[in-house]
Image (cartoon, coloured by chain):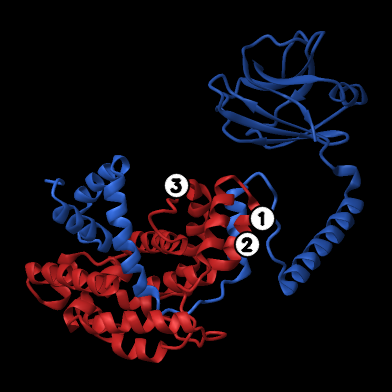
Chain colours: A blue, B red
Amino acid sequence: MNYKTADLRRALAGDYAIGLMPPTARKRFEQLLLDDAHLRAELAQWNTHLASLAEPLTAQPVPEHVWQAVVSRIEPQKLHVPAKRPFWTWLRTGAVVCSLLIAVTVGLLYTRDNAQYKATLLSGTEQPALRIEAHADYLKVQPLELAAVDAGRSLELWAIPVEGKPVSLGLIPTGGDGMIGLSESQQQMLGTRVVLAVSLEPRGGSPTGQPTGPVLYQGPLAAL
Amino acid sequence: MNGITLYAQLISTDNWHGAITSDVGRTGILTANTEYLKQLLAQCSLGNRRAFETLYRSVAPSLHSVALRCMGRRDLAEEVVQESFVRIWHNASRYEAHLSAPLTWMINITRNLAIDQLRKHRELPLSDLQQDAVADDTPGADEQLDSARSSRALNHCLEQLDGMQRQTITIAYFHGFSASELATQLAAPLGTVKSSIRRGMERLRRCLES
């Protein structure tokens, strides 16, 4: 395209201003605009005249939320509370109060049964296999993706302290779903930093009191 | 089916003569204190948030009217206004005061954003976009002589155009229709539409410059 003659530049700027150019020509023209102040001036002339098409319009009030949205866009690091809507605020507060009440009631009823610790045991390939919740005097065991164990074998759960030998917590129930009761010493042990691990043992559990088979799953026990 | 609703819309929305004569004497959106807006824009380019808010309060209603004229729907228009001010804030330093009035520059930002949106959604029938159209002719708060005068000048200049020129220019300006889209909708040859727009723009410009 030839951008040299004044008439042509004026005509092209006009085409660009009103939107007659196809997308590729638009992009090329925009490139030219960057380095060509005269072309920018030519375009500004057109824009000024075309903007007079907006003259008959009447100013329209803008809802306040638009300004709030602008502010949050240009200052994303600041927390902006959206405009309050009384009904929804009331409803939300009501809902929060209700759920608190329910939580407290349920909490009081089941206070002795709150899970205190939790662990998700992963397989060697980092697949979640078993979820374990430690309550006051028992463990709740939930299978996620547990390998099938043949009838002659058992899965045994161990607590491994930072220093010291693994302590058996008991056998994983068949199928993985169920509970394991905890003795007082076992309960105390779970209060320290331990990793839980599951090893494959002969049916009925390790004969030695220490893991004898391969560790299939493990994961740290975290306080809630 | 698209074509029929669109065509009806093209014919009906661009009754310039009526729109303009009924608007003479009202506060037009272009009557703004240019020097004041220039100062505010300069302050914005320095990162002055307070100046930005003042600028917003001064020109948002005007830009809203432009966005509404383009989009035809309040929710879409509000999004365009929001986007416009984000862009104005970030691009304030690129405003060239010697080239155009501040409001012209800002109107153009709004119009470009609106047209981008419209082109993206062009697969939707225009009637859908515009069925909630809000008339942009609520009376202004007060009347200003300047506005009446410039409206008269524009009115006079638009009267110099023939019907097709007025229609094509207005629709291209506010709705971003390409020449070929206009040609299809008006069932006119592409070359005719293009030259109609170009001749109309030249005539409008010469009249406004005289």
- The amino acid beneath tag 2 is Thr
Residue wearing tag 1: B50
What's under tag 1, amino acid-wise? Answer: Arg
Is A194 left or right of B59, judged from the image as shown? right
The chain under label 3 reads: B
Left or right: B178 as drawn, with respect to A199: left
Q: Are marks 1 and 3 in contact (CB under 8 Å)?
A: no
Kind of residue indicated by mark 3? Arg
Q: Residue B153, image x and y in percent?
A: 33, 81
In the rendered structure, the answer to whether residue B182 lies left or right of residue B158 reads left
User: What residue sits right under mark 2 in the picture?
Assistant: B54
Instruction: Please report the residue visible at 79 percent of the width from the left and 61 percent of the height from the top.
Output: A96
Which residue is disc 3 drawn over?
B94
From mark 1 to mark 3, how far is it between C-alphas?
A: 19 Å
- Against A40, residue A47 (above or below) is below
Please tell me whether mark 3 sits on a helix, a strand or a loop. Answer: helix
Q: How far across and down, in percent of the image, does residue A134 sit? A: 80, 33
Q: Nearer the viewer, residue B207 or B91?
A: B207
